[in-house]
Amino acid sequence: MATYYVGPGGNDGNAGTSWALRKLTLNGVEDIPVVAGDTAFVGPGVYRERLDVDVAGGAGTPITYIGDVTGENTDGVGGIVRITGSDNDQTVTRDHCIDAPGGQDYRTFRGFLFDATSSVLVEAVGDYWTVEDCWFQDGDSLHFRVDGSYTNCTLRRCVFWLQRPYGITITFTHGVQVDNSDHLIENCVIISATGSRGIHIARHGNIIIRNCFVRGLYGIEVTQTLTVGQTTTVENCTITGCNTGLRAAVAGQITEDYNNLRDNATDRTNVAVGANSVDYLVLLNPIMLYAGASQASGYRFPPFAFAPSEWSQTRALAGNNEPAIDLYGIGRPATAAKNSWGPVQFHDAERDTGTVRTGTASIVFNDAGRHQMWVPIASEATTISVYVQREANYAGTNPQMVIKQPGQADRTTTDAGAAGAWNQLTDTFTPAALPSYVVVELVSNNTAAAGNYAVYFDDLTVD
């Protein structure tokens, strides 16, 4: 199992075994050739090529390409890692960003921006493909396609943005039935243009779609009759703004529950209403309204796109089989009833002026949640401290300060003091040289449902 590197300024004549000896193109690494278990770190930059996938990985040893957006393994700076079908950002030159002749199993791609092809942005041509933490935009007809008898493909924490009209964002199709395909789509945002379809399924059975935000001509559709007993399962999703939200060719091909379908011309066609599904206003976080308002009383942290707002009835509602982390990689509460439907977890944190240790304001968690702050830092002995106070009825693991640095193990300090008092959480450590920042995550793990259980954080210092 080898590690390879790709980046601007490289040369495909290099060995690719270090950043100093990096390849220039992804195909330069693929053609070494890579073998099962290999990993390629791709540095920030623009790659104007079609990656032709030639090699299969193995069970437990996939071949993995990682867009190193943090820079921790490549240039030390980080940034967008883009694979594009255009040579000049004006015209489209290539039909795919990633393609394969067929049978290249166990491939993983993480952290890329895909755009500007004349056909399909990413074509999964093998079993056990995983595509996660990626952004798809501006494909001519399709963003992601499985066309064949391939199984066990996973799309996780991806955004599919405005597929062109009369195209399909995600499709699983084949000329004959594919039973027990076991594909998984979770924590994804799928926004299709008017006339485009969101998720299209033809002859692939047993697909799970969960915790997604879907909008399109048809949000999720099954267009061909499946083998009896083969279904598409949809859970914990928000489906809105569609001509038809859930559409099946035959009743029973889509099983849905714990979903919010709202503001669709038709919510369901040949789909039974889930016992726990609802019709609530979507009420997403109004992120743009808060720009520049960080001093306003009641300001909420953080204003992530596609997060439910404080008024949303799905911000804290038990779903089913929800992923432990959301679209942004932030953990959901341990208590199911405090989880949010859709791809982004609601974190009930805001500015508070009533309970403070010093100064004029603290951060209050009115319930379980997490708030992250990015701190530029040098590789030297560093002490990070914060004061925390929890109310009397708080239950569950006490509040925590978690220090995260990409590539390093998390460092967790847990409140061990009494409730109703300001207790200091402190950690002294030497961070890695790259990347040159840490993320300080403040956490309320509250599980109580009644009484006073707010958590306050104040006076964070970095020395």
Image: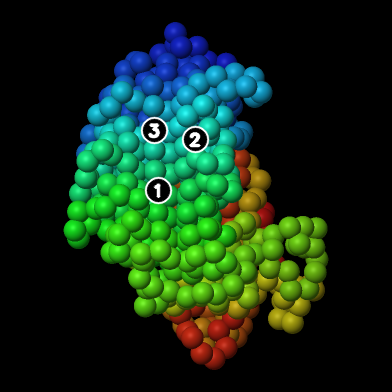
Q: Amino acid at mark 1?
A: His
Which mark is nearer the camera, 3 or 1?
Answer: 1
Which SS class for mark 1? Answer: strand
State which quarter of the image contains the N terminus: top left
Crowd class of label 3 (few under 14; some 14 to 19; many from 20; radius 10 Å): many
Residue on which the image places disc 2: 141
Is residue 43 visible in the rendered structure shown here?
Answer: no
Dot 2 amino acid type: Ser
Kindly identify which residue carries mark 1. 200
User: In this orientation, which residue lies closer to the viewer: 11 or 273?
Assistant: 273
Please state if 326 lies on the left or on the right of 386 as rendered: left
Q: Is disc 2 placed on a helix, strand or loop?
A: loop
Q: Are marks 2 and 3 in contact (CB under 8 Å)?
A: no
Per the image, label 3 sits on a secondary structure element best described as: strand
Q: Residue at x 71, y 81 (%)?
A: 355
Answer whether labels 3 and 1 touch (C-beta < 8 Å).
no
Task: Please name the amino acid that badge 3 sits on.
Answer: Glu
Q: Which residue is mark 3?
A: 123
In the picture, which quadrant includes the C terminus? bottom right
Residue 123 visible from this viewpoint? yes
Q: Earlier in the sequence, mark 2 or mark 3?
A: 3
* Residue 67: percent from left, percent from top: 49, 34
Task: Using the image as rendered, state which of residue 311 and residue 21 is in the foreground.
Answer: 311
Q: Residue at x 21, y 45 (%)?
A: 177
* Of the image marks 2 and 1, the number of the one nearer the N terminus: 2
Mark 3 vs mark 1: which is more N-terminal?
3
Percent position of residue 48, x then y: 54, 21
